[in-house]
Image (spheres, rainbow, N blue to C red):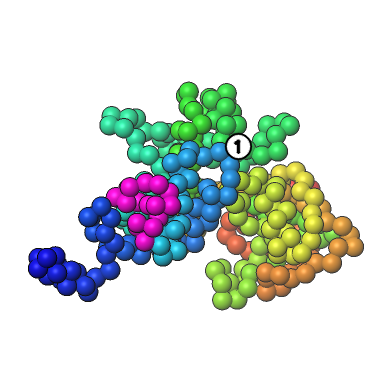
């Protein structure tokens, strides 16, 4: 009894959880906003391995301040398992916290060039009759188009989870009215402040480029738009970003009577293609601007 009392007092200044006689310090896991959204996506539905969903749930509950033993009881895992998941995340390995590690001697899932080819493929419209790209469809089309050798859905899903940072897709709209194009100026104080651009934004997980562009136009200008054909695409790497961007520009149509609302910009205006080079556009847009001004793109 005396030994137990001494140990209890020695640990009194710390927050430990004791499960099966094994003490665990409360982890204090803090998910980033991006990882919280990823966790919420895994928990919101879709076909995922049960163990991945339970790991996402464990991380979400640790983030919410629950203790290791409480989370372990909820997911019906050993406390050590939950503790290890939390520690892997804190050590900066979010994918290992969620997904299984390859076995000894396993080959790399996909090399970088294969991943780049797949990412470029899914930035295009899905095959006829399909509303969007799914993991199964990406795997099937990648093999059919000889982007990769034989590969399964799980390999494709894990490769996507580990490499989504490699290339971010951005979409933008060319909206014409009375022979002029809608251009928008970025807000002062933000990144690339007061530079001009075409309205649009990033493609989020689960969206096709056209769906993303329609959403961005609703969010930025408060209008419903019909997304038309692709006009131009390019790649660009900004110095402040880690990775390269794919930029895809589409014709988009809005109703002539539609009232545009400025929900995201310093200002916007309608400009004739011939005068576009006079505006201080983002570097990634410059080649397209010159093509529009010279009527290379009608």
**Residue at mark 1:** 134
Of the pair 86 and 171, the residue shown nearer to us: 86
- Rendered location of residue 13, percent (x, y): 22, 74
Query: Can residue 152 be spotted in the picture?
Result: yes
In the picture shown, does residue 241 fall above or below 188?
A: above
- Rendered location of residue 222, percent (x, y): 76, 64
Please identify the dominant SS of the magenta region: helix
Please give the name of the residue rendered at 43% of the width and 52% of the height, measured from the top-left corner. 74
Q: What stretch is highlighted in magenta?
A: 67-82
In the picture shown, does residue 282 fall above or below 58?
A: below
Q: Is residue 100 left or right of residue 142?
A: left
The quadrant in which the N terminus is found is bottom left
Question: Is residue 68 a member of the stretch shown in magenta?
Answer: yes
Instruction: Classify mark 1: residues with Cα within 10 Å, few (<14), some (14-19) or many (20+).
Output: some
In the picture shown, does residue 98 fall above or below 172?
A: above
Most extreme residue toward the right is: 257
- Rendered location of residue 257, percent (x, y): 90, 62
């Amino acid at each position: 009894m005396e030994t137990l009392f001494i140990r209890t007092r020695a640990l009194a200044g710390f927050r430990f959880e004791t499960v099966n006689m094994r003490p665990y310090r409360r982890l204090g896991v803090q998910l980033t906003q991006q990882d919280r959204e990823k966790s919420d996506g895994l928990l919101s539905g879709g076909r995922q391995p049960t163990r991945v969903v339970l790991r996402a749930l464990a991380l979400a509950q640790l983030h919410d301040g629950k203790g290791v033993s409480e989370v372990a009881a909820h997911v019906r895992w050993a406390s050590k398992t939950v503790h290890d998941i939390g520690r892997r995340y804190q050590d900066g390995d979010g994918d290992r916290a969620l997904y299984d590690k390859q076995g000894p001697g396993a080959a790399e899932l996909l090399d970088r060039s294969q991943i780049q080819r797949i990412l470029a493929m899914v930035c295009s419209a899905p095959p006829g009759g399909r509303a969007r790209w799914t993991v199964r469809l990406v795997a099937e089309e990648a093999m059919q188009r000889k982007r990769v050798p034989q590969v399964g859905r799980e390999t494709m899903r894990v490769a996507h989870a580990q490499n989504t940072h490699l290339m971010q897709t951005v979409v933008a709209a060319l909206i014409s009215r009375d022979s002029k194009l809608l251009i928008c100026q970025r807000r002062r104080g933000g990144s690339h402040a007061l530079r001009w651009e075409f309205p649009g934004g990033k493609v989020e997980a689960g969206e096709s480029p056209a769906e993303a562009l329609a959403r961005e136009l609703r969010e930025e200008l408060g209008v419903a738009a019909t997304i038309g054909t692709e006009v131009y695409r390019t790649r660009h790497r900004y110095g402040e970003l880690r990775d390269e961007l794919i930029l895809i520009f589409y014709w988009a149509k809005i109703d002539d009577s539609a009232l545009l609302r400025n929900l995201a910009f310093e200002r916007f205006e309608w400009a004739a293609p011939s005068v576009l080079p006079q505006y201080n556009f983002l570097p990634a847009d410059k080649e397209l601007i010159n093509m529009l001004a010279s009527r290379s793109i009608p």
